[in-house]
């Protein structure tokens, strides 16, 4: 099963692939390269053209794959039904409106 799964992922013509997580997590990690598959051209862009990030200056990248468990523990605050999402949202808005380091622990 795992071999077939890995072959399917290898066959995807995307520069960044996320499994069981938000695709923006690859970009947000900053360490993983984010961009288009190297087969893209200006006539056939598909998943994008070029790369950003690539903290480790890797060469010859085909794609970055980020794998996460199917169930996140603890529940992430942006998940529907998170117990304290409303309170957290208010706190983040207060921090954005009047930023101070003292509000961060809250």
Image (tube, rainbow, N blue to C red):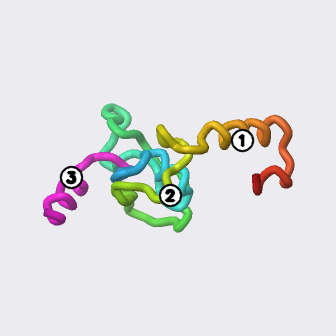
Instruction: Determine the secondary structure under disc 2.
Output: loop
Marks 2 and 3 sit apart, C-alpha to C-alpha, by 32 Å
Instruction: Determine the secondary structure under disc 3.
Output: helix
Reading the image, the residue beneath label 1 is 92
Marks 3 and 1 sit apart, C-alpha to C-alpha, by 40 Å
Between 32 and 58, the one lying in front of the other is: 32
Q: Judge the density around disc 2: few (<14), some (14-19), many (≥20) Cα neighbours within 10 Å.
A: few
Residues in magenta?
1-15
Identify the mark nearer the N-term, 3 or 1. Answer: 3
Q: Judge the density around disc 3: few (<14), some (14-19), many (≥20) Cα neighbours within 10 Å.
A: few
Residue drawn at 38 percent across, 62 percent down: 60
Quarter of the view holding residue 83: top right
- Is 101 situated left or right of 83 in this image? right
Between 7 and 84, the one lying in front of the other is: 84
Mark 1 or mark 2, whichever is nearer to me = 2
Reading the image, the residue beneath label 3 is 11
Q: Position of residue 26 (x, y in %)?
A: 47, 52
Q: Position of residue 55 (x, y in %)?
A: 56, 63
Reading the image, the residue beneath label 2 is 74
Mark 2 or mark 3, whichever is nearer to me = 2
Between 91 and 55, the one lying in front of the other is: 91
């Amino acid at each position: 099963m795992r071999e077939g799964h890995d072959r399917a992922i290898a066959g995807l013509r995307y520069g960044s692939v996320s499994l069981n997580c938000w695709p923006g997590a690859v970009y947000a990690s900053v360490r993983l390269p984010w961009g288009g598959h190297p087969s893209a051209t200006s006539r056939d862009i598909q998943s994008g053209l070029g790369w950003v990030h690539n903290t480790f200056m890797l060469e010859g990248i085909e794609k970055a794959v980020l794998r996460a468990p199917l169930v996140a523990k603890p529940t992430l605050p942006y998940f529907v039904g998170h117990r304290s999402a409303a309170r957290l949202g208010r706190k983040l808005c207060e921090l954005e409106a009047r930023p101070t380091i003292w509000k961060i622990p809250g």
